């Protein structure tokens, strides 16, 4: 048995063209593998070996899992569907996939009627989170920042203004989490001239077919004093009122602090003027 094991590891052909399957980050992924079975098929002479390149992902012989040579990366995360073996199904369930599970996987099955190899690529992808919008007032306009995280691979971003593409007037920053490898994407746009207009932010995560599209309505209320505009944002994200509220609270606190200090100063000056130490 050990000899067959060694032989199978060497036999794997990694140059053949192959398909790629995509797993969702954090979820289980079923790696497909089938083999022919007939009436003479016998579980006791069935040998199944799952590999990623030369690493052993899972192996099964003598009618049971044999995990002493399993690579540490896969420990406690693999299982065969033993009920399905009689039907020629040697698919493997890999739990809690991460970006480190990317690679070329091979399933080798040897039975009393013959042997078979199957290779394919595995890619992991993750959905981007609901984008958060922050907007800040500048002295001469406003700045809109959209952030979305926990995604993979890097997304394609697009900004539209009244349905025309303004992506090249925006800036994008991509950051990768050192532990998970997932991306945080930030994209911002500054408008000096704020008019009543509609902006659209689009995030596309191709392998997953994920499309996030959010409309942002900008209103310029020029009926106020000249040069002073009030911007409102409709259909925006919940964060804005919260941010405005926070700003208000901060300003109130700051204001209170300054007033207090000034009063203290005045008192001190008054005491000094009146010769009281
Ligand atoms: C093998 O079995 C698993 C688990 O029941 C199933 O999800 C998968 O579709 C099966 N594969 C084939 C080719 O029948
Ligand atoms: C932005 O893109 C448009 C067409 O999409 C092009 O005409 C324009 O020159 C670009 N502007 C800059 C600054 O690259
Ligand atoms: C923008 O729209 C608002 C509300 O519809 C309106 O009151 C305002 O006058 C408009 N501003 C401009 C500059 O058209």
Image (cartoon, rainbow, N blue to C red):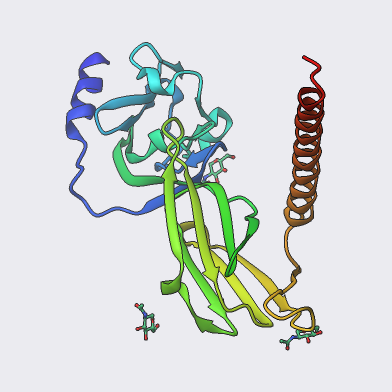
Q: For this rendering, which residue is in front, 233 or 250?
A: 250
Quadrant assignment for the N terminus: top left
175 shown above or below 82: below
Instruction: Find residue 132 and report its horizontal and vertical position in percent.
Output: 64, 54
Q: Is residue 182 left or right of residue 57?
A: right
Q: For this rendering, which residue is in front, 129 or 245?
A: 245
Q: For this rendering, which residue is in front, 16 or 126?
A: 126
Instruction: Find residue 215 and report its horizontal and vertical position in percent.
Output: 67, 72
Look at 34% across and 46% down and name the residue there: 121
Instruction: Find residue 137 and report its horizontal and vertical position in percent.
Output: 64, 62
Q: For this rendering, which residue is in front, 247 or 77?
A: 247
Q: Is residue 13 left or right of residue 96?
A: left
The answer to whether any part of residue 244 appears in the image is yes
Look at 75% across and 38% down and name the residue there: 258
Q: Is residue 254 left or right of residue 184?
A: right
Quadrant assignment for the C terminus: top right
Instruction: Find residue 235 and report its horizontal and vertical position in percent.
Output: 76, 68
The answer to whether any part of residue 60 appears in the image is no
Q: Is residue 83 left or right of residue 114?
A: right
Quarter of the image where one finds residue 168: bottom left
Look at 71% across and 74% down and name the residue there: 228
- The extreme top residue here reads 68
Q: Could you tell me how many numbered marks the image carries?
A: 0
67 shown above or below 168: above
Look at 32% across and 30% down and name the residue there: 51
- Quadrant of the displayed image that contains ligand 2: bottom left
Quarter of the image where one finds residue 65: top left
176 shown above or below 96: below
């Amino acid at each position: 048995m050990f000899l067959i094991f060694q032989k199978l590891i060497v036999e794997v052909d990694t140059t053949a063209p192959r398909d790629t399957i995509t797993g969702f980050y954090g979820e289980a992924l079923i790696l497909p593998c089938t083999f022919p079975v007939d009436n003479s098929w016998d579980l006791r002479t069935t040998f199944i070996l799952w590999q990623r390149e030369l690493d052993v992902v899972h192996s099964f012989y003598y009618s049971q899992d044999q995990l002493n040579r399993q690579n540490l990366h896969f420990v406690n995360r693999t299982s065969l569907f033993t009920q399905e073996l009689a039907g020629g199904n040697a698919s493997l369930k890999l739990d809690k996939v991460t970006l480190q599970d990317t690679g070329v996987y091979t399933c080798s099955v040897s039975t009393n009627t013959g042997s078979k190899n199957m290779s394919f690529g595995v890619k992991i992808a993750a959905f981007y989170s609901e984008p958060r919008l922050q907007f800040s007032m500048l002295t001469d306009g406003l700045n809109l920042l959209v952030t979305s995280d926990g995604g993979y691979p890097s997304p394609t971003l697009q900004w539209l203004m009244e349905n025309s593409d303004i992506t090249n007037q925006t800036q994008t920053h991509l950051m990768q989490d050192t532990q998970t490898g997932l991306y945080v994407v930030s994209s911002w746009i500054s408008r000096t001239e704020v008019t009543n207009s509609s902006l659209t932010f689009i995030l596309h995560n191709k392998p997953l077919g994920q499309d996030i599209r959010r409309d942002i309505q900008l209103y310029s209320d020029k009926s106020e004093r000249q040069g002073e505009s009030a911007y409102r944002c409709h259909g925006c994200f919940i964060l804005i009122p919260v941010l405005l509220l926070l700003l208000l609270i901060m300003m109130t606190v700051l204001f209170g602090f300054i007033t207090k200090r000034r009063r203290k100063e005045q008192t001190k000056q008054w005491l000094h003027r009146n010769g009281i130490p």
